[in-house]
Amino acid sequence: MNDSTATTMRSRPVTGLTERLPGPEPQTTAQSTTQVSGETSTIAHLLQMAPRGLALAVDPAGGALVQTVRGIRGPDGIEVTREGRSLRYAAITALGLARLDPAVQREVLGGRTAAELAVDCAVQARPDHDLGAVALACWARAEAAEEYDPGLVARLLTALGSGQPHATVTVGWAMTAAVAAARVTDDRRITQRVIQQARRRLVAEQGPTGLYPHQLPGVPGRRARGLRAHVGSFADQVYPLQALARAAGLTGDESLLAAAERTAARLVALQGRAGQWWWHYDARDGTVVERYPVYSVHQHGMAPMVLHDLAAAGGTDHGAAIEAGVAWLERHPETVEEMMSDRFGLVWRKVGRREPRKAARGLGALATAVRPGTAVPGLDKLLPAGVVDHECRPYELAWLLYAWAAPEEEKR
């Protein structure tokens, strides 16, 4: 549910954050020993920035997480506005902030801890019709608060067993939530059934090269219709990859790890020469449908997070691909503008094409629907990339923290 209200404010300092954050030494995740050797300074810098940026995403009036922080030109110079609300983003924020010292969590959240935010998200998710929000809230409560939520787990099982189609991202989140919930309960019967239901859908609909479409049918093998039915976004690939890797780590099932490996291998093979993780893919033949926009969170947060999980589960270590993706934040060839804003502690959302709304995506989907692997001729000249989207959403900074900041229990 979104709130259309917007609040304008200037950047405000969050006292005490800097000295409590990780220093410039190499960062490792809890899931993997993979390090970004050449880009350690970039990650360290981002880890210093992220709590300041997340603090801007907290509405001071009520403490809720907003959907978007946007940079705009105001009467007194550049300002940022807060816009909307997102339960999904709040749950992801709880997951990311749980990696930091509780004192930093309270400064960012106006007195609350990540665990308290996670429990609040779980309460809000109970009547929510958004299954993605339910899955993320269940996951956040299990990891950030170390609490099992039987009601949310039961909702995931009912939804996955309903025979209805679901977004690929949502099924991935449901599986990861069940894995997290299984680690904080002695009774794993329901969580195991959620994992089995999600596995059934993900394995059945994985394409021959390891990639997924945007939606998974309720009945395996029943293909969705439409010009974009074959297209899946980067998110549609990485969240199933993460779920399968984590489920493999929990169960020891090598077939789950093999499925995750296929997805990772194809994404890495398709990575851009400057480290870009592209936007849209054809699940049928594993080709790129549309490259742009390139999203910053894919580079610094989502790709590192899931590839770390893959390595931790015993899969391939894709450290070089992670390093290349992080390097794009500093050495992006599409624009001379900076993607990281020290002034506000934000990372700007993406670099896209100069185009009417999603025109290139539509052209790519149409061309590949007619013939897989077809590229639209002259697209880069007609709709060149280089437009920076000056907004940042809290989940983006939260995934950055989740990917790179060690959990509190590992620091003790």
Image (spheres, grey):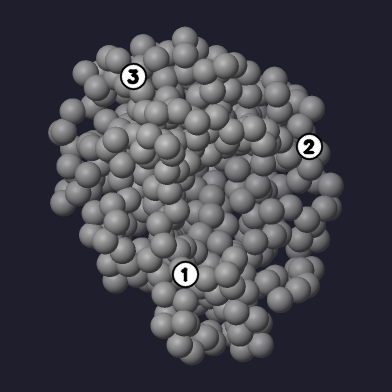
CA gap, disc 1 to disc 3? 36 Å
Q: Which mark is residue 224?
A: none
Cα–Cα gap, marks 3 and 2: 35 Å
Badge 2, how many Cα within 10 Å: few under 14, some, many 20+? Answer: few
Q: Earlier in the sequence, mark 2 or mark 1?
A: 2
* Quarter location, residue 334: bottom left
Which amino acid type is marked by label 3? Val
The label nearer to you, 2 versus 1, is: 1
| Callout in the foreground (1, 3) | 1
Q: Quadrant of residue 313?
A: top left
Q: Is residue 252 above or below residue 190?
A: below
Q: Is mark 2 in CB contact (under 8 Å) with mark 1?
A: no
Q: Which residue does the numbered mark 2 point to in the structure image?
A: 129
Camera-side residue of 249 and 377: 377
Query: Which residue is label 3 attached to?
Result: 14
Name the disc covering residue 354, or none: 1
Answer left or right for 400 relative to 91: left
Visible residue check, residue 307: no
Q: Position of residue 180 (x, y in %)?
A: 55, 31
In depth, the one of 284 and 98 nearer the eye is 98
Q: Is residue 82 toward the left or the right of residue 52 in the image?
A: right
Query: Element type at marker 1?
Result: loop
The N terminus is located in which quarter?
Answer: top right
Measuring from the top left, give residue 181's x and y in whole percent: 59, 28
- CA–CA distance in space, label 2 to label 1: 35 Å
At a point 37% along the width and 39% down the height, the residue shown is 78
Earlier sequence position, callout 1 versus callout 3: 3
Judged left or right of residue 12, residue 6 is right
Q: What x and y, as percent, mark residue 231?
A: 62, 70
Q: Give yes or no for contact between labels 3 and 2 (Cβ–Cβ under 8 Å).
A: no
Mark 1 Cα shell of 10 Å, populated few (<14), some (14-19), many (≥20) = some
